[in-house]
Image: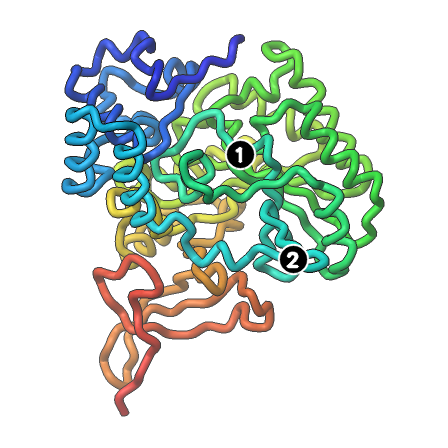
Amino acid sequence: MRFITYNTKNFRKIEYLRYLSEDVKNEIAIVSKVIPFKTNNYVVDYLIDWDNYQDDPIYILNFPNRHMLREEQYEMVRRGVEQKLAEKDLYKIINEIRMGLNPHPAQQITNIPKLNGENLKGLQHKYQDIVLFFPTQGQSCHAHCTFCFRWPQFTKELDLQFSMREIDKVIAYIREHEYIHEILFTGGDPMIMSPVTLNRYISEILDAELDNLEVIRFGTKALSYWPFTFLPAFNEEAEQMLSMFKRIVDRGIHLSIMAHFNHYVELDNEIVQEAISNIRLTGAQIRTQSPILKHINNSSEVWARMWNDQVNLGLVPYYMFVERETGPFEYFQITLQEAYQIYTDAIRSTGSLAKTLTGPVMSASNGKVQVMGIVENPLDGNKYFMMQYVRHRDYKQTYKPFFMQYDENATWVDQLNQMRVNR
């Protein structure tokens, strides 16, 4: 099967877009000048219900709409397009909007480590035992999620991308820090790379025989957006990819595919189910994660079904995230108390094997902070969020419950105050 992508320059070629009015198409074209847009024929043909596309979660997940920008932002870009501004003048407007969308939330820029005084701009080291590697060739995706917190990776007009090719420097950094036990290939999506390219990175890592490296992870949306990556019957490169997975496992390194599924629809066809089976046959494990998103999955029924379906397919539910404060987050965000209620209602409806999942979790500046509960203090009669860090820059600070003052409108931990009890 051919890999066909659609972006703002050619998305009008998609047959199903006959359902869209010219006004909607124009809105997509305007918003996608700010929010990167890309989809493909698998998403369009297999995942979207075009008879009800306005409310379809996968359509909203892929196709930008005007409400993902503030009205004044949308109007600025629309007027610039209609006035046929020079490209440099239009991009000045666009980039001013982008810089106001908090392109690097949770102070990601501070996670860049140094090796011999040199910044490794394709590496992030936030938690003691793991590094994130952004291979240059993997800084794209099979399709772009409209909520994506790493949208700056896809905006070439701004110099905001994390990426590097020098795997030898990554290896040297891991060797120098013996407490690093994991490397996570991320992006973008490392599964956008050909297996030949990806295998070069993996071969150098394996050949280095790093005694401290125990786990390799790939963060990917490929199972949702292009499962043919793992189907030899449809893709001649798939066998090479699966063989590489098996080679990692056979070397005694734990391999985990960190799969992003945002809705159970993405699991509900034979193509993705066969791809999942093929990966598991290599000995790799597949863990799943997603943010909770208004308009897409802010329903306990959706999450409970998704987790149960994942378990039945042999996947391990891992994280439910709170949408990060970046990009069009205002369109997707829900309050912390809503997120907690959806999580508890959903997890109560699942079997035991889905309870491996941690949530709801915010990837904040200091680490991943979990909302554990909403409690009332008998001393002052006030409600509080009970929280803990399940990951922290200082690992000694993990799994220590603490309390934040309850705010029914809060959508992020930074909006809350530390508990003060009136005695």
Taking depth in this image into account, of 344 and 370 the one nearest to the observer is 370
Q: Which of marks 2 and 1 is in front?
A: 2
Q: Indicate whether 201 appears above or below 45.
A: below
Count of labels shown?
Answer: 2
Name which residue lies at 23% across and 80% down: 381
| Quarter of the figure with residue 93 | top left
- The residue type indicated by label 2 comes to Lys
- Mark 2 lies on a secondary structure that is strand
The three-letter code of the residue at mark 1 reads Gln
Q: Name the residue under label 1.
A: 139
User: Residue 237's spot in the image, x, y percent?
Assistant: 66, 16
Residue 160 percent location from the top left of the image: 46, 44
- Coordinates of residue 92 in the picture (x, y in percent): 29, 39
Q: Which quadrant, please, contains the C terminus? A: bottom left
Question: In the figure, 154 relative to 178: above or below?
Answer: above
Q: For mark 1, does the 10 Å Cα neighbourhood hold few (<14), some (14 to 19), or many (20 or more) residues?
A: many
Give the number of the disc on residue 114: 2
Compared to residue 218, the image places residue 32 above or below, namely above
Q: Would residue 361 be found to the left or right of residue 390 on screen?
A: left
- The answer to whether residue 141 is seen in the rendering is yes
Q: Residue 249 in the image: x percent, y percent?
A: 76, 36
Of 231 and 154, nearer the camera is 154
> Helix, strand or loop at disc 1?
loop
Q: How far apart are marks 2 and 1 (CA)?
A: 21 Å
Residue at the outermost bottom position: 423
Residue shown at the point (37%, 17%) measured from the top left: 44
Specify whether 126 is left or right of 26.
Answer: right
Seen at 78% across and 54% down, the residue is 175
Q: Circles 2 and 1: CB distance less than 8 Å?
A: no
Q: Can residue 258 be seen in this view?
A: no
Q: Earlier in the sequence, mark 2 or mark 1?
A: 2
